[in-house]
Amino acid sequence: MNVDFSDKVVLVTGASAGIGESTALLFAKLGAKLSLVGRNEANLRAVAAKCEKQKGVKPLAIVADLGTDEGVEKTAKDTLDHFGRLDVLVNNAGISARTCIQLTDMATFDEVFRVDVRGVYNLTRLLVPALVETKGNIVNVSSISATVVAVGSLPYGMAKAALDHFTRLVALELAPKGVRVNAVSPGVTVSTIVKRMTGYTEEEYQAWLSAAATAIPMGQVCEGDDIANMIVHLASENSRLVTGTVVEVDGGLRYGSAGNLLARQMK
């Protein structure tokens, strides 16, 4: 079945880089009307410009911090005011932190949960009525950190575990309304999140990716497009009876030495 989103409105959070950028570009290639959200205005507008070049459809670019109620409310209001509907919500925005229970503080916990859990919860809550109207769907972007246990992955792993269960709970609640809810759980993926978290230089980051690949059964780290392809597949009619699923895209990392790899990342 061909995938065509030319009559669909798609909201992608965390769209200014990494997985969000790849996802926005793929939806743009498939004709979607896009609402793109990010905190970095320059990057976000650059991504929006790339998307517009695909099919000539100008995205709505919303600069907002989804760790705040104001940012979430602005995102929901601006999207619905501009397009009058919503068909797909991609909850991709997220932050991470390197810490463990012996070193952490509550400010770090609150920061991660505010974006990765509370922001998703709140934005979904506000947009569910619009998704019920269109019988749309939601794709949450999780992480194998939700299920792989590694020293140092607090509180990110906890937040992503909460997101996985949120996916299942909301899927069950909204299924009778015709709204599907799924999640994609990436493994090691080329993005900006590790560099932000570690402070690695580009050279150090490339060395880390090379080391990571050796711990992955399929021998390769994921690219943003690998995750974007699964997000679009789940959002499309090709997945019309798929709901409440968490799909890992990780090259088999969760079956290999993922815990050791994630722990090394924390050092």
Image (cartoon, grey):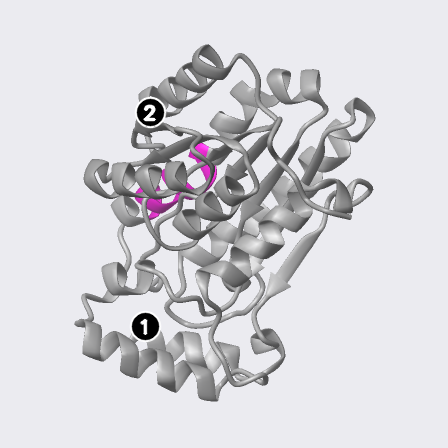
Q: Residues within 10 Å of mark 1 (few under 14, many from 20)?
A: some
The location of residue 155, given as percent across then percent down, is 40, 55
Q: Which residue is mark 2?
A: 71
Q: Find residue 144 and report its image quarter.
A: bottom right
Say what amino acid the circle numbered 2 marks: Gly
Q: Residue at 35% across / 55% down in the picture?
A: 96
Question: Distance of mark 1 from mark 2, alpha carbons?
Answer: 30 Å
Magenta range is 109-119
Q: Quadrant of the C terminus?
A: bottom left
Q: Residue at 62% across / 63% down in the picture?
A: 248
Q: Magenta stretch mostly in which secondary structure?
A: helix
Q: Find residue 133 and report its image quarter.
A: top right
Mark 2 element type: helix
The location of residue 143, given as percent across then percent down, is 51, 58
Q: Is residue 243 above or below residue 211?
A: above
Q: Is residue 190 above or below residue 127?
A: below
Q: Which residue is mark 1?
A: 266
Work out whether residue 14 can be spotted: no
